[in-house]
Image: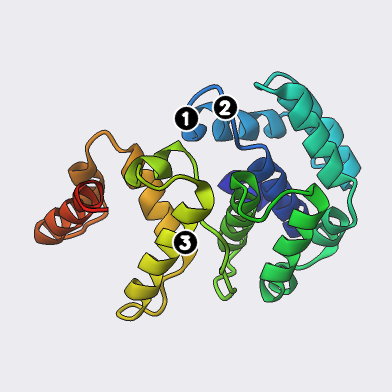
Amino acid sequence: MEPLARRYPAGAFLTLMVVAGLNDYRLKGKAEFAYWPPLRRHLERYPIPGSPRQMANILEPFYQKERYGSTKVKRLRRFLNSPIAQRLWESRPREIATNFVDIWKDIVRTMGQPPTAKTMAFAGKTLAIGLLLLGERDFDFRLPIPVDKRLLSLTPWLPDNEKVQTFWDKVLKRLRCHHPSLTHLHLDSLLWQYAGASDPHVYLSNLKIPPSAVSKIVNAFNALHDDP
């Protein structure tokens, strides 16, 4: 989505990132191939929208062709017709970063779902990624980790999303004792990509992590399955 971050006004781009996060579920394939690139290509065929309503009109044909299309169009309209979408559209990135958690809570209330729901957590994550793409790094990202099949595969003994999120919250607190700058966003990115990698050793090595540390990390993840 980086090309759109350069092309769109900041508020419009951040509004788009929330919409994309809210509808990132039950996809036709892996999100990094089957959802985000086609969404970007679709938007690049249209002029920059001048309002949330115009954005809804541009995005509706894309979501109609997706799995659960009618539901996704309803979610699209519900969010983009809301006061919080208009607020995002008109705000500067620094203002959004300063009020990040409160804005996310408004999004959750607007959509009428539990804050622990995957798409609610993911909307917060995509908003955070949008801020990072716009150069904002100083904001409070204390949100639940989005739980999907990948994350569930790391802790198969935990029965529901809330317990998975609580588990990783505890892990993050321990990590922050040694690395205070770590956030849920860092942990989620690592877990999501690690769980989806065909070869975890290769994935971690590509991050320039020393081989000895790679082995320790892989062994630690494997131990989750052996000793819950």
**Residue positioned 47% across, 55% down in the render:** 163
Residue type, numbered disc 1 = Lys
- Please, what is the three-letter code of the amino acid marked with disc 3? Thr
Q: CA distance from mark 1 to mark 2?
A: 7 Å
Q: Is residue 94 positioned above or below 218 on the image?
A: below
Q: Nearer the viewer, residue 160 or 96?
A: 160
Q: Amino acid at mark 2?
A: Leu
| Image spot of residue 84 (x, y percent) | 84, 58
Q: Gap in Å between the C-alphas at discs 1 and 3?
A: 26 Å
* 106 sits left or right of 126 in the view: right
- Pointer 3 residue: 166
Of the 4 image quadrants, the one containing the N terminus is: top right
The secondary element bearing badge 1 is classed as loop
The residue carrying pointer 2 sits among few (fewer than 14), some (14 to 19) or many (20 or more) residues within 10 Å by Cα, namely few
Q: Badge 1 is on which residue?
A: 30
Q: Position of residue 138 (x, y in %)?
A: 57, 76
Residue that badge 2 annotates: 27
Q: Identify the residue shown where x is 40% and y is 68%.
A: 170
Instruction: Tell me the number on the disc at residue 1.
Output: none
Q: Are marks 1 and 2 in contact (CB under 8 Å)?
A: yes
Q: Nearer the viewer, residue 210 or 5?
A: 210
Farthest residue to the top: give it.
65
